[in-house]
Each structure stands twice: as C-alpha cells, then as structure tokens.
Image (spheres, rainbow, N blue to C red):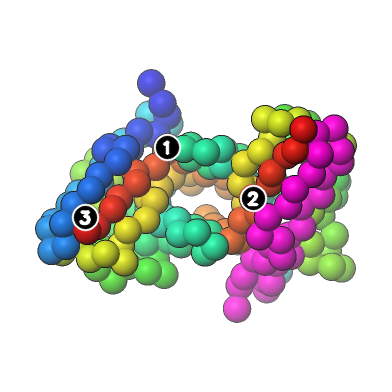
C-alpha cells in the first residue's frame, strides 16, 4: 500500500540550531516528492519538490531536502532555524502518471525555543 | 485576492444540518480537491475533480458530496452533519499539465455540535 511516514510527531530545536525532519515513503516506483509547511491558521504552502535528477533539492525559506532511493526517504533540512519556522511540516508523495492525487504524511510539528 | 479562496473560514453547525463549504480559485487550474485535516492523521482526500465533468471519490467520501459548478468553483456539502465531521477542511488545486504541487486555500474550520 502507498503510504508516507513521518516518524516524529513533534520536534523542538533551539533557534540557530540545525534541523532535520524525517520522511519515509512506501510506493511502487519513485514518485513525486514534496514538503509542505502549515503555519498556524493557514493553509499548506509548498516548500520544495523532487521529480528527478539531482537528489538534493533547494526550496524556499532556506530549506533543502535529500532524496535517498535506497532508503525510500526524503528528509527535510535547514542549517539554522529561525523562530518563524515554527509550524507543522508535511511530507507528501504523488504518482508520476495516472493523475496527481497526493498522499500526505501525518505531519511533524516544529517548536523553536529561544 | 488569494489564489484559492474558501468560505466560510469558520462555521459552527448543529448535528443533522446540511452545510456547504465553498471554494473558488483564480489559478486557472483544472484540478481541484477537498481534503480533511485531523490532528495526527494528516490530510485525507474526500473528493477530487480533474475537470468540470469528472468527479471522483477519495478515501473518505461517505457523508459528503461535491459539486463542480465551473472550472473555478468546487463546493463540498455535508448532507447531514455529525460531530465526527468536526475538522479543518482544505480545498486545493493543481494543474493537469504537470505536477508542480498543490495550491491550498486557508481552510474552513467546521465544528458540529
């Protein structure tokens, strides 16, 4: 079955520290991969996406993610977290063909402490 | 104006009432989706529409119906609301030409009492 797993329900990091949010997927073939961010009271905003090619992708707000086929992972990273990064982050996958229905992980809530 | 607009933003309704959530978009996308968000469960797909004449059930369509009135408008109805339909509802759009991800509305917080 197709699924997306975000193992960490919540993570707390200090401002200025580095961040890594984990995402693993189960899919028949390499899908499209996405990370979205949801700030309080807002809809989801696309941070970055991977289709093919370079396995390290850059996104908005200083985020990057690395696709590792052998581990079926697509982890999100940021070198130095800012207080404004506190939000919920969702990993998602979608098929390369046959439509663009996206499957979302359960989300990881990021808390940033001063 | 926002690319994807959802109305209302918040709604409290009583059990058994019919309620409609509306979504309109200015992105020009032909694909539209309704998702439900519950804490710890992420987003689950209720219905999706790839064009005005193509509407499909998602994984949790029971108790819901939809109408695609135009390319830019996609509404979600709860025929007889029940408390476990209390959730945050999102409308999203995407382009059929390529999958560059979704554009989301700001959500409707629905409470059924």
Residue density around tag 3, few if under 14, some if 14–19, many if 20 or more, within 10 Å: some
Q: Is residue A28 left or right of residue B84?
A: right
Give a yes or no on whether discs 1 and 3 share a subunit.
yes
Label 2 and label 1: CA atoms lie apart by 18 Å
Residue under label 1: B106
Letter of the chain that mark 1 sits on in the rendering: B
Q: Tell me the mark number nearer the camera, choosing from 3 and 2.
A: 2
Q: Tell me the mark number nearer the camera, choosing from 2 and 1.
A: 2
Q: Residue furthest bottom?
A: A1
* Range drawn in magenta: A1-28
Disc 2, SS: strand
Residue density around tag 2, few if under 14, some if 14–19, many if 20 or more, within 10 Å: many
Q: Residue at x 42, y 37 (%)?
A: B106
Q: Which mark is residue B2?
A: none
Mark 1 or 3, nearer chain start = 3
In this rendering, does residue B112 appear at all? yes
Of residues A34 and A12, the one drawn nearer to the viewer in this rendering: A12
Q: Residue furthest front?
A: A114
Residue under label 3: B77
Q: Residue at x 56, y 42 (%)?
A: A38
Letter of the chain that mark 2 sits on in the rendering: A
Label 3 and label 2: CA atoms lie apart by 30 Å
Q: Residue furthest left?
A: B17
Q: Quadrant of the N terminus of chain A?
A: bottom right
Q: Is residue A23 left or right of residue B8?
A: right
Label 1 and label 3: CA atoms lie apart by 18 Å
Of residues A45 and B30, the one drawn nearer to the viewer in this rendering: A45
């Amino acid at each position: 079955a197709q699924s997306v797993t975000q193992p960490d329900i919540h993570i707390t990091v200090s401002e200025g520290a580095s961040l890594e949010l984990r995402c693993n997927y189960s899919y028949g073939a390499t899908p499209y991969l996405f990370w979205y961010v949801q700030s309080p009271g807002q809809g989801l905003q696309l941070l970055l996406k991977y289709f093919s090619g370079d396995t390290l992708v850059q996104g908005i707000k200083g985020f990057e993610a690395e696709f590792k086929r052998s581990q079926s992972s697509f982890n999100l990273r940021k070198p130095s977290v800012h207080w404004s990064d506190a939000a919920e982050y969702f990993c998602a996958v979608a098929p390369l063909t046959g439509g663009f229905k996206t499957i979302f992980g359960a989300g990881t809530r990021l808390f940033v402490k001063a | 104006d926002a690319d994807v607009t959802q109305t209302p933003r918040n709604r409290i309704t009583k059990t058994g009432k019919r309620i409609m959530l509306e979504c309109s978009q200015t992105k020009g996308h032909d694909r539209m989706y309704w998702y439900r968000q519950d804490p710890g469960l992420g987003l689950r797909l209720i219905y999706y529409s790839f064009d005005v004449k193509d509407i499909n059930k998602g994984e949790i369509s029971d108790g819901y119906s939809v109408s695609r009135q135009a390319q830019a408008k996609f509404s979600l109805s709860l025929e007889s609301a029940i408390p476990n339909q209390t959730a945050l509802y999102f409308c999203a759009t995407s382009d059929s030409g390529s999958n560059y991800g979704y554009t989301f509305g700001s959500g409707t917080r629905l409470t059924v009492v």
